[in-house]
Image (tube, rainbow, N blue to C red):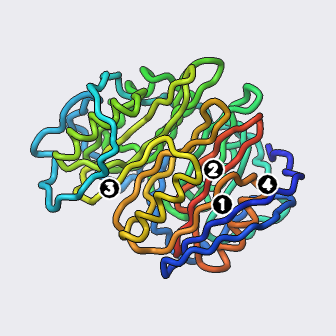
Amino acid sequence: MTPEPQKNNAVLIVAIIGVMGTICVASITVSGNYIVEKQRLDTESTRIALSVIPTQNEAIPTDLPVPSLTDTPTATSVPPILTTITVPTDMITATPTPSPATIMPPTETSTATPTRSPTQPSIGEVRSYGLTLSDLESMYGELWEQGFRLDILQTYVVNDQVLYTAVWHPSTEGEVRWFAQTLSDVESKYSDLWAQGWRLKILQAYIANGQVLYTAVWHPSTEGEVRWVAQTVSDVESKYSDLWAQGWRLKILQAYVVNGQVLYTVVWYPSTEGELRWYSSTSPNLESKYDEFRDQGWRLKILATYVLNDEILYTAVWHPSTEGEVTLYGLTASDLESKCAEFQDQGWHLKFLEAYVVNNQVLYTAVWGPGQ
């Protein structure tokens, strides 16, 4: 189902951090319909996508141990620490409250005809907004056959209806996806898939009819993984301190709100890369902190967006890098498509995308990086 196009003009403050590290700020007015677009199939995607069934040639181990969400990783699974990175002093610490891990059962694939916009060029990235689950599965089936896999998947609720925004990139990697599942469902499925050589690429919690549900996507891997769900920021920071010293870094960090409380879904992976974290910041405060970190050679790795008491807030994670970066806030789908087309022509691609809902309107935070 194609959502109704946005009709309203929007004046946006755009902060562009260029390849050479310069910042340009401009006020722009955008409007019009958005499109579902493919871009550049002739270049190989450099990002990891996910898949449904492993190929026949894939050797999938069947005897791997399943780590508990609250387990401390064993010494053999943790790489040695190569460098010591100074972590900001304003991080919160407290005793974590363990919770069960997360995983989800599959939904049946819809056979409905996918809805497309009139213009969808057959080149390198496919984006689609406001999809129902059946629309998403139908479009997924078609794109699977064309050699596309999920790169970004956002779940949100508008007027009590669960909707999805998806971005596919060229890939033929295997992929498993599960939708609308409870925490216990996810944990059960995770145990099965772990033993078969699958690891999480996407894990997102959302609230539907007062219940916390999850969207998950796995891809083939035997890499170590630690999951921590339904945790407060103090819980996350306490667990983070333990895992940091053992050589684990953030792979997924997603924020959501339950009864006025901000909770996090977190996944760590083995790494000794430097990392900085910043919680519950407004857009101006985030930009100020980003300017500081950018000058020190840090770039965004994760940017979680959520709404608390009608205020849009951000939790950010940076890693060492000097590449160019473009970050835009408060975009409608039509705004986003307009900027994607513009940046595509300049050789930039979506690194990550966050959807959130304000007054029943879906808005986006988007980050682009150089390359395809």
SS at mark 3?
Answer: loop
Which amino acid is tagged 3?
Answer: Glu
Residue 195 in sight: no
From this viewpoint, which residue is outermost toward the right? 7
Q: Which residue in the structure is indicated by mark 2?
A: 166
User: In the displayed structure, does residue 199 sit left or right of residue 68?
Assistant: right
Which amino acid is tagged 2?
Answer: Ala
Q: Which mark is residue 136?
A: none
Distance from the alpha carbon under mark 4 to that under mark 1: 11 Å
Q: Which residue in the structure is indicated by mark 1?
A: 126
Which amino acid is tagged 1?
Answer: Val
* Residue 273 % position (x, y): 26, 59
Distance from the alpha carbon under mark 3 to that under mark 1: 30 Å
Q: Are marks 1 and 2 in contact (CB under 8 Å)?
A: yes
Q: Earlier in the sequence, mark 3 or mark 4?
A: 4
User: In the displayed structure, does residue 305 sit left or right of residue 295?
Assistant: right
Quadrant housing residue 10:
bottom right
Residue 60, placed above or below residue 275: above
